[in-house]
Image (spheres, rainbow, N blue to C red):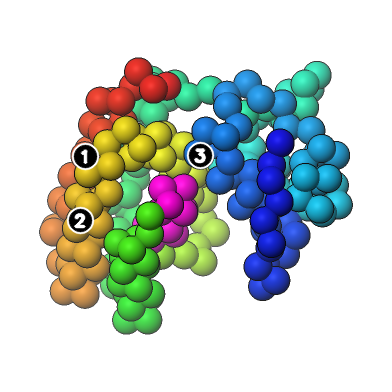
Amino acid sequence: MLPNKQPNRSRTAHEYARERIRTAILSGELAAGTRLLQREIANDLDVSTTPVREALRDLATEGLIYLDAHRGAVVRSLDLDEVREIYEMRMALEPLMIRRVLGSITDERLAAAAELCERMAAEPDLSVWVDLNRRFHGLLSDEGDEGKLAQTLRSLRASASAYVSLSLDARPEQVGEANAEHRRLVELYRARDLDGIVAVTLQHLRNTLAAIEATHQEF
């Protein structure tokens, strides 16, 4: 099911399994409706079943799979109405988080965000780009925050990842547009321009949703 790749030894078996399964889902290697059998995945990845079980729990939280009482872990199908709701919620909540963190965001975090921008600009693998994109937005808003707002936004971004990956695959020019918007966001955060950050964030979310809607037949 999942060809094994030499794991980066800086990662745990749990992290390695989660990354491999997530990548396979986002790339379409594991199609909607596919049952994910713990023992089979563990054998494929040459790990024990414990990290696979932990990885599947994480992916269920992200919205990429669901846990069925009878069938076990199953790759979710994607629904356009759901993604619209996700982005409507993000457009309502992201400005709240921006206002909360803008006064305390550090130069170190902005430097890390700028580094992620450069990595995304050079990254040819869409599934990797999607993960870097999620980390970028988390770094600028809720890194280390365990409050309800932060947890909700992390869950929404994770749930959107599969949709983003598919839209980028159908409309690759969107990657360059998103990279430019990311660089602009870093500049605005450095200037502490609240209105500018909110405006660009909302436009960025609208652009992403429009790209997803334009490729809805893929879902």
Q: Position of residue 40 (x, y in %)?
A: 82, 37
Q: Is residue 101 visible?
A: no
Is residue 95 found inside the magenta-colored segment of the image? no
Q: Is residue 123 visible?
A: yes
Numbered badge on residue 181: 2
**Mark 3 element type:** helix
Name the residue located 22 percent from the left edge and 64 percent from the top edge: 183
Q: Earlier in the sequence, mark 2 or mark 3?
A: 3
Three-letter code for the amino acid on which mark 3 is drawn:
Leu
The stretch in magenta equals 125-138
Q: Position of residue 67 (x, y in %)?
A: 71, 29
6 above or below 173? below
Cα–Cα span, label 2 and label 3: 23 Å
Q: Residues within 10 Å of mark 1 (few under 14, many from 20)?
A: some
Q: Which residue is mark 3?
A: 26
**Mark 1 element type:** helix
